[in-house]
Image (tube, helix red, strand yellow):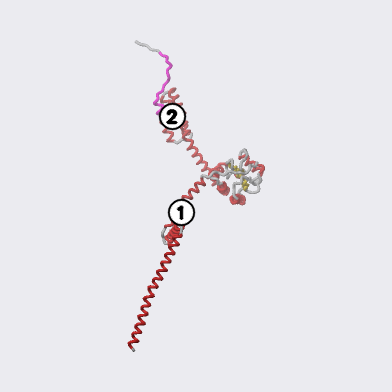
Amino acid sequence: MMRMQKLKRSWSILSIIGATLLVTPISFAVNGEASSAASSQSSQQLGDQSVEDMVAIAKAGQQNEAINDAIFGNEAITDNIPTLGEASAEDSRSQSEVATAEPRQSTAQGVDSDKLILNSPVVDQANIFTPQEKQLLTQRLRHIYDQGLAQAALVTVPTTNGMDIFQYSLQVAEKWQLGNKDTDDGLLILVAVNDRNIYILSGYGLEGVLPDAALNRIIDEEITPSFKQGDYAGGLVKGINRIEERLVADPDVLAQSDALAKERAQQQNQAVGDSPSLFGTFLIALIFGMFLTSALGRILGSFLATGGFALMALSAGAGLFTTIFMAIFLWLFLISRGGGGGFGGGGAGGSW
């Protein structure tokens, strides 16, 4: 009896083990079939994709990889980011384009000087300013007036209709009666855009601090360079700032500054004109020297011609070293070419 129970128990255990072994292959088979089905389905889906879709997917994957690389320190995507040098080059090209810009032309109609109406410190009859530019220029001129320095106005016109810009400016200033009657501190800046002319007219009371030479320097150095680039407002702001600097400066300082500027201008003009003037003096001395050596002899004629050349050159402002060098050259040339009087063919001969 006991043996039968043990056999039954052993049989039960064997049955359980056998069932377990049978279930495991079935599970593996089921999973394998599921995996195969998934693979087949994936292959079917890939097969349904077009070539364009596959290329797009590949590009998206490459972009994701580049982004991930950049985040973790790889510079794969920095090739498409402009470097500092490239940015500087682009800025240089932009500045070059601005520098070579042609001055703008006005499409507004011309107006006679007696038809202009002074309703603001800035009368933009040529329509070349933006509202912001006109506001800035108005503020600058009002600032000068509020300080009691001058009553200034700025006028732009397309053209003066053939009239001289000085006469046009004078008529406008007289009609508007710019400036205080007692101090005569009126100031008018007139720009004829299409004529490419500008004139700054100052009252008698401002001529001490704004002489013609100073106004010409302001126009040449500050205003016209910007005008040539088409920047009318920028040039006028610079010019007005320079005018204000002179109006508030000490008169003695201005006098010294103007004297230095005048001296520099004279030196520049002299440097430009020295060579032609000195060369002309040398030619004159050479021609007269040839006549003198023929009439007075080589030594005396050369001495007089060389001495005269040296005196003329030094009085004209030529350098001492240059004058001495050219005088020596002139002396050697004249003394070596011979001299004495000419012969007319008369005479007499004899023998013994």
Q: Residues within 10 Å of mark 2 (few under 14, many from 20)?
A: many
> Which quadrant, please, contains the N terminus?
bottom left
Q: Which of the 4 quarters of the picture holds residue 325?
A: top left
Q: Earlier in the sequence, mark 1 or mark 2?
A: 1
What's the amino acid at mark 2?
Answer: Thr
In the image, the segment drawn in magenta is: 330-347
Give the residue at x 44% y 26%.
Answer: 289
Q: Nearer the viewer, residue 124 or 82?
A: 82
Within the magenta stretch, is there residue 337?
yes
Q: Where's residue 261, x and y in %?
A: 52, 43
Circle on res. 82: 1
Within the magenta stretch, is there residue 247?
no
Q: Is residue 226 left or right of residue 83?
A: right
Q: Name the mark nearer the viewer: 1 or 2.
A: 1
The residue carrying mark 2 is 306
Q: CA distance from mark 1 to mark 2?
A: 70 Å
Residue 323's place in the image compared with 178, above or below, is above
> Which quadrant, please, contains the C terminus?
top left
Give the residue at x 66% y 48%.
Answer: 119
